[in-house]
Each structure stands twice: as C-alpha cells, then as structure tokens.
Amino acid sequence: MLLNNNFIKLIPYCWILLSFNVLANDTKIYQQDEVGNIKYHKPSSTIQQDGRIIETDTVGNKQYHKQQYKIQNGKIYQTDSIGNIQYHKPKAVIK
C-alpha cells in the first residue's frame, strides 16, 4: 500500500516543527501557492500537543473520519479515528 500524497507532503513540516519544539500548543499547517500566499479555502492540518495530525476543513472543524497520523519517537504513524496507532500500515521516519 502506498502512502497518501498529503502524508508525504507533511513530513518536512513535521520535521521543522519537531526540531524547534513548537508542539506546545495546537499548530496549524496551511497549504500555500507558489508565491507563498496561504490558501484558506483549502483543507489544512492541525498538530495537537500529543503529536496527532488531524485534517481540518476550511471552517476549522477537525475531520476525525479522515486518515490521521501521530508523531512518536521520531516516526510518523498512521492512526485510526480515535488515535490508536496502526502498526500494520506504512510509517515514515524523521531524520
């Protein structure tokens, strides 16, 4: 099974956030265009204090029914809708 493209795009941002230890509060990741303008009309992602990455719609509602991820021990795991890590699914390693 291949990893979701959105998941692959999040890896560099997660690495940056972890390296600066910014996960003190919920952090939002927005999509940008080529110039750097934030696309508020596109879905974004929220990284919670416990390391869960949840897709958020344009209004700010968390989409718990969509694929979620969790950052733990330098790895990004796929999780189910309540946050349990799915160890049988592919994961990414942050280096």
Image (spheres, grey):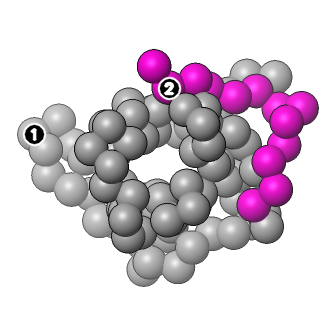
Q: CA distance from mark 1 to mark 2?
A: 27 Å
Quadrant of the image occupied by residue 82: bottom right
Q: Is residue 61 above or below residue 41?
A: below
Residue type, numbered disc 2: Ile
Q: Is residue 52 left or right of residue 48?
A: right
Query: SS for tag 1?
Result: loop
Residue displayed at 45% across by 19% down: 95
Residue 17, numbered circle: none
Q: Amino acid at mark 1?
A: Val
Q: Position of residue 34 (x, y in %)?
A: 17, 35
- The mark found on residue 94 in the picture is 2
Horizontal arrangement in the rendering, residue 17 relative to residue 72 (left or right): left
* Nearer to us in this view, 23 or 64: 23
Write down the region rendered in magenta: 83-95
The residue where tag 1 is placed is: 35
* Total marks placed: 2
The structure residue drawn at horizontal position 27% and vertical position 44%, both measured from the top left corner, is 20
Mark earlier in primary sequence (1, 2): 1
**In this rendering, is residue 26 above or below 55?**
below
- The reply, left or right, for residue 21 in relation to residue 75 is left
Does the segment drawn in magenta span residue 48? no
Residue 63, picture quadrant: bottom right
